[in-house]
Amino acid sequence: MAGTKPLRQRMIEDMTVRDLSPSTQQSYIYAIAKFSRYFGCAPDRLSFEQARTYQLHLVGQKRS
């Protein structure tokens, strides 16, 4: 995958090893992209506390 960032490539490889379907992989990548956009920074710079904050945000919007 030319041009794929190392973190994204690692995530794809890990999901492939776990035998996740391509559609599941696409959904997970989309979810991480939304999480990253919410805080305006790369996912590898986000903390566990920010993950918790985002989860609370999703629950507040009736999502999980």
Image (cartoon, grey):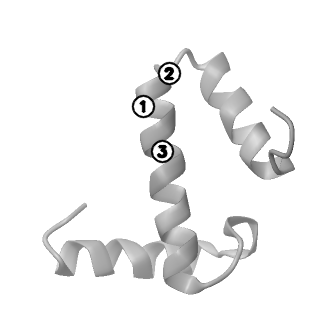
Label 2: which secondary element: loop
- Residue where numbered disc 3 is placed: 28
In the displayed image of the protein, which residue is found farthest to the front? 2
Question: Crowding at label 1, few (<14), some or many (≥20) Cα neighbours within 10 Å?
Answer: few
Question: Crowding at label 3, few (<14), some or many (≥20) Cα neighbours within 10 Å?
Answer: some
Would you say 27 lies left or right of 32 here? left
- Residue where numbered disc 1 is placed: 24
Q: Residue 39 in the image: x percent, y percent?
A: 56, 84
Separation of disc 3 and disc 2 at Cα?
10 Å
Q: Which residue is at 42% across, 42% downward?
A: 27
Q: Quadrant of the N terminus?
A: top right
Looking at this view, is 5 or 7 the one in front? 5
Q: Are marks 3 and 2 in contact (CB under 8 Å)?
A: yes
Q: Residue 38 in the image: x percent, y percent?
A: 49, 81
Would you say 11 lies left or right of 39 here? right
Q: Residue 33 in the image: x percent, y percent?
A: 54, 62
Looking at this view, is 26 or 60 the one in front? 26
Q: Are marks 2 and 1 in contact (CB under 8 Å)?
A: yes
Label 3: which secondary element: helix
Q: On the image, which quarter does residue 46 sit in?
A: bottom right
Compare marks 3 and 2 and give the one earlier in the sequence. 2
Would you say 31 lies left or right of 10 here? left
Q: Are marks 1 and 3 in contact (CB under 8 Å)?
A: yes
Q: Which residue is at 46% across, 19% downward?
A: 21
Separation of disc 2 and disc 1 at Cα?
6 Å
- Residue type at mark 3 is Tyr
- Residue type at mark 2 is Leu
Q: Which residue is at 77% across, 39% downward?
A: 9
- Residue where numbered disc 2 is placed: 20
Would you say 2 lies left or right of 44 here? right
- Residue type at mark 1 is Thr
